């Protein structure tokens, strides 16, 4: 469990960076719009017609694109079809297929909730208009960065980037800011109340006001306002966003719902909830179905692991199979082997949707990274992995990380030579394990 907690901490940091990146992109978007507005003003002074510029840009774009035709948008997922498919896979104990269908259904349900939120957002705010083509609804399937709904408003050298996020990490981060008297160099911030909800208003060096209002259990409204004269204008704009309406779409009204049932029951209830247009209720049932499937996959993986490895026996009572709704740690399995005197230890673990997947995959696909100190490529049971010796570790420690699709299988060896590591690693049925999680 300690290892899982350390991984979750690392994941939290990565997701914090991901959220920072998202809002960094928002900031760049606002600055670009501001620059466009300034350019338009300069053109007006110089007597350059905006239409001429637009026509020239359009001609350049046409010449670059040739006979390019704009494609149609993707159709939304069929929730009923996905739930039915998940029920069939679950009944046949094809839990990996059931997991895939449930996750896709969850994304589809979150997208529907997102579009309902978007419909509740004003088409214009503070006399600034929005362009539907710039609207965004994103569901990642990752609990900490789950649903993001955005709309952009502009006009009269002012811009608002509005985001509603059903995002536990982001909400917690801003809650921390509100409770700690948050302030940084170059930034002024204070807590305010909007529509009865406590929020945080900040003003930065780029002359942008950012209003953050957490609501419900893990949701937040963020307004990034550029070109506003003062905070009163920001407050007036914020009043046009109906936070209560967003909250009602993201809260499940049922006060009593069991969590000790099986996946097939959850899926059946999810189907009924969806038919009744109880989208948030459907979402809750799908989340519980996913946890049940993850637990079953975890047990299957544990059954595949050997009872003895490299002469070491399993440490009794330390097997773990954990399922969470966090998405990136949906399936987590670990088994520990040790010598009688604990001088030698092996830890095997599997994590689905691991935050380390990108790093390991990048290493394996880039020959230049293979020469990094203490790292090399290895192949176990037909799968490539990253072999890494922990420098300066006493006793010696070696890690092998093997990615496949959304799963990462890890082996940690303490006080083993390289030859011993290779021999032990090849006793693990990595291929069969990936067949279960594929």
Image (cartoon, grey):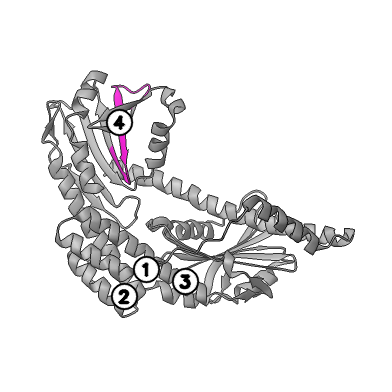
Q: Label 1, label 2: how many angstroms apart (C-alpha)?
A: 9 Å
Residue 437 is left or right of residue 46, and the answer is left
Q: Label 1, label 4: how many angstroms apart (C-alpha)?
A: 37 Å
Q: Are marks 3 and 4 in contact (CB under 8 Å)?
A: no
Q: Where does the magenta region start and end? A: 388-409
**Residue 251 percent coordinates (x, y):** 38, 73
Q: Earlier in the sequence, mark 2 or mark 3?
A: 3
Front residue of this view, candidates 148 and 234: 148
389 falls in the magenta region = yes
Q: Do the residues labelled 1 and 2 touch (CB within 8 Å)?
A: yes
Say few, some or many: other residues with alpha carbon within 10 Å of mark 3 (under 14 / 14 to 19 / 20 or more): some
Q: Is residue 57 above or below residue 284?
A: above
Kindly state the secondary structure of the residue where label 1 is placed.
Answer: helix
Residue bearing mark 2: 274
**Residue 113 percent coordinates (x, y):** 42, 71
Q: Which residue is drawn at 58% across and 52% down?
A: 24
Residue bearing mark 3: 115
Residue bearing mark 4: 400
Kindly state the secondary structure of the residue where label 3 is placed.
Answer: helix
Residue bearing mark 1: 109
301 falls in the magenta region = no
Q: Which of marks 1 and 2 is nearer the N terminus?
A: 1
Label number found at residue 268: none
Front: mark 2 or 4: 2
Which quadrant of the figure has residue 272? bottom left
């Amino acid at each position: 469990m300690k290892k899982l907690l350390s991984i979750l901490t690392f994941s939290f940091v990565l997701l914090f960076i991901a959220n920072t990146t998202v809002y960094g992109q928002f900031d760049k978007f606002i600055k670009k719009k501001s620059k466009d507005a300034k350019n338009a003003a300069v053109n007006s002074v110089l007597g350059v017609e905006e239409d001429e510029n637009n026509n020239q840009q359009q001609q350049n774009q046409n010449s670059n694109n040739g006979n390019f035709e704009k494609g149609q948008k993707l159709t939304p997922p069929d929730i009923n079809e996905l739930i039915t498919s998940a029920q069939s896979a679950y009944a046949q104990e094809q839990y990996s297929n059931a997991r895939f269908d449930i996750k896709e259904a969850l994304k589809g349900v979150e997208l529907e909730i997102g579009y309902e939120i978007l419909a509740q957002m004003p088409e214009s705010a503070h006399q600034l208009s929005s362009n539907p083509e710039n609207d965004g609804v994103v569901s990642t399937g990752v609990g900490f960065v789950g649903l993001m709904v955005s709309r952009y408003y502009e006009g009269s050298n002012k811009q608002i980037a509005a985001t509603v996020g059903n995002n536990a990490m982001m909400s917690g981060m801003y809650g921390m800011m509100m409770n700690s008297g948050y302030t940084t160099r170059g930034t002024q911030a204070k807590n305010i109340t909007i529509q009865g909800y406590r929020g945080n208003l900040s003003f930065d060096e780029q002359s942008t006001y950012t209003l953050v209002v957490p609501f419900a259990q893990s949701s937040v409204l963020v307004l990034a306002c550029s070109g506003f004269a003062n905070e009163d204008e920001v407050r007036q704009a914020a009043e046009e966003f109906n936070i209560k309406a967003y909250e009602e779409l993201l809260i499940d009204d049922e006060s009593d719902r069991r969590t000790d049932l099986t996946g097939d029951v959850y899926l059946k209830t999810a189907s009924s909830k969806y038919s009744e247009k109880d989208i948030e209720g459907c979402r809750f049932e799908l989340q519980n179905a996913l946890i049940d499937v993850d637990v079953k996959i975890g047990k299957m993986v544990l059954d595949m692991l050997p009872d003895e490895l490299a002469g070491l026996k399993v440490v009794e009572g330390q097997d773990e199979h954990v399922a969470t709704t966090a998405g990136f740690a949906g399936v987590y399995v670990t088994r520990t082997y040790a010598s009688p005197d604990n001088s030698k230890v092996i830890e095997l673990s599997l994590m689905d949707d691991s935050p380390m997947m990108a790093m390991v995959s990048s290493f394996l696909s880039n020959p230049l990274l293979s020469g990094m100190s203490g790292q090399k490529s290895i192949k176990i049971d037909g799968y490539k992995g990253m072999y890494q010796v922990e420098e300066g570790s006493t006793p010696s420690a070696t890690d092998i990380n093997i990615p496949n699709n959304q799963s990462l299988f890890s082996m940690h060896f303490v006080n083993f030579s390289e030859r011993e590591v290779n021999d032990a690693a090849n006793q693990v049925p990595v291929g069969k394990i990936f067949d279960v999680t594929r």
